[in-house]
Amino acid sequence: MVKKRKNIPSHGWGFEEILAEMKRGKNNDADWKSGKMFGFVYYPGDNIARAVEKIYNLYFYENALNPSIFPSIREMENQIVSMTANLLNVDENFAGNVTSGGTESIFLATKVARDMARENKTLIDQPEMIIPVTAHPAFNKAAHYLGVKVITIPVCEYKRADINSINRAITNNTIILVGSAPNFPHGVIDPIPEMGQIALKNDIYFHVDACMGAFILPFMEMAGYKVPSFDFRVPGVCSISADAHKYAYAPKGTSIILYRNSKLRKHQIFVTTDWPGGIFATTGFLGTRSGAGIASTWALFHLMGKEGYINNVRETIELTKYILKKIESLPGLRIIAKPDMSVISFTSDRDNIYLIGDEMTKRGWYLDRLQFPEGLHMTLTNTNVRKCEEFIKDLTISVNSVRKSILKKVSSSTLLSITRGIDKTVPEKLLQKAIKSGISRISKKGNSSGSAAMYGISANLDNRKNVKTMVIELFDSMYSL
Ligand SMILES: *Cc1c(COP(=O)(O)O)cnc(C)c1O
């Protein structure tokens, strides 16, 4: 493919000109403030957001790379870690850092587990990671980068990690066991106490991924809701990842990785002593890193207070309960697993759920698509509260309209049969083209018309390697002008 090469302008543009150009571009972006989007943006409301913007600007250009040049950033980082440690009930031996996101926190925990095992268990030849199939792909990514083999175990009917399968998967090569609190697809917390026991019995590192839950579950508990055990009170838990840029409302690029003790964290710190540029050490994956995310997170903890978080959490959980009840009352719809907090996944036992999703897209809603099993997905926040009744109304209309079109048999029969994997005779080439156009339509235009086709096909395609190659090609073209 011939790539367009664009020039940096020879002379700088005026500010107004730049702003106008940006605004033009932004018109194509999702309108997350509408309350019709889920996840992606976690918003504390206009007043707090304005205050955080000012704090962000105070550290706009500062670099958190060197802990002695900007000691105020290091102090804030240490305090963020300490406040999160307290929230997650770890004793005073804890250690931790602020990272660039859940992915980096997970990467670092995996590295610590691998290097601990290398130090203590000389017999390991090919380190292995045991994850439930519902664990976040960041674990597959970390394992890929760190030369760790992923062993995926199934979940039981309630979508929690299957304990018997974990026991069977453990070998002398197992270096890390992972549980989620909660997992992204179904919002369900794995059986952390049982997993902790397995980890202790077999002397295996145990990481709990609370990227999604860390800033909601503790406040749920404080508000009096029943929360399954997931934090450092559970024996065997070695580390927890906690994303501040989700339910703590921090701007993107902030997560916390916490360890039960500083002995573990020592394996996280990277040092090289022989470089002509000097002795070089970093706490995480990044070198140069922004001080603004750290400052904003620190400010948010203080702007919100426990009280602010508790109030928001209460509102979000009540919204979740209400929507769950309404979804269950609609014909054919079924909650895939009863969630432990504010993530809902549902499917239809009667109609194609992706077609229902497409109907919702037409009405301006952004719902994630799940596969294995097929479903729709929402991460609720209090931004969604005021659109709650509109959501129920539109979902009811969407379910009815899919039903009607099927009854009338006016829906595109080819598309539908491809989607459902009934028509196995479609030539491979055509299938690939269909998938590609499905994905392209979703991603390039920022809406998901045709997502029924894409997810339907990819979920039913036997050769998933093909899908992978196509997605790589697609990304290659999307990240080119
Ligand atoms: C978001 C998320 C991650 C990954 O975090 P990023 O910040 O997107 O890198 C990991 N696990 C869970 C459960 C998540 O929700």
Image: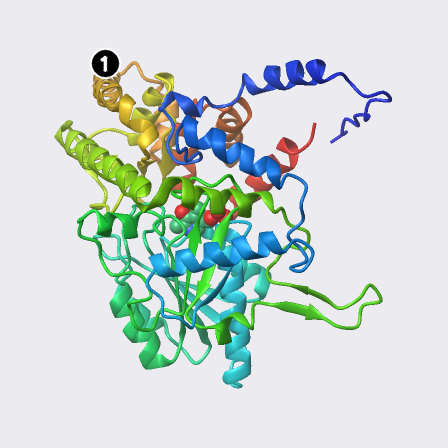
**Up-down: is 288 above or below 229?**
above
* Corner quadrant of residue 420: top left
Callout 1: CB less than 8 Å from ligand 1: no
Residue 407 x %, y %: 21, 17
| Left or right for 279, reference 322 | right
Q: Quadrant of the C terminus?
A: top right
For the rendered model, the colour scheme is rainbow
| Left or right for 177, reference 223 | right
**Up-down: is 353 above or below 144?**
above
The residue singled out by tag 1 in the image is 408
Q: Which of 254/343 is in front?
A: 254
- How many numbered marks are there? 1
| Left or right for 340, reference 330 | right
Residue 9 x %, y %: 82, 22
Q: Quadrant of the N terminus?
A: top right
Asked whether residue 455 is in view, the answer is yes
At 54% from the left edge and 45% from the top edge, which residue is drawn? 295
Residue occupying the far left of the picture = 329
* Badge 1 amino acid: Lys
| Left or right for 167, reference 44 | left
Asked whether residue 431 is in view, the answer is no
At 81% from the left edge and 26% from the top edge, which residue is drawn? 8
Q: Which element is circle 1 on?
A: helix
Q: Which of 153/201 is in front?
A: 201
**Up-down: is 447 above or below 472?**
above
Badge 1 local density, few (<14 within 10 Å), some, or many (20+)?
A: few
Q: Which of 441/245 is in front?
A: 245
Residue 58 x %, y %: 61, 38
Q: Which of 394/133 is in front?
A: 394
Residue occupying the far right of the picture = 10
Residue 65 x %, y %: 67, 55
At 50% from the left edge and 39% from the top edge, which residue is drawn? 251
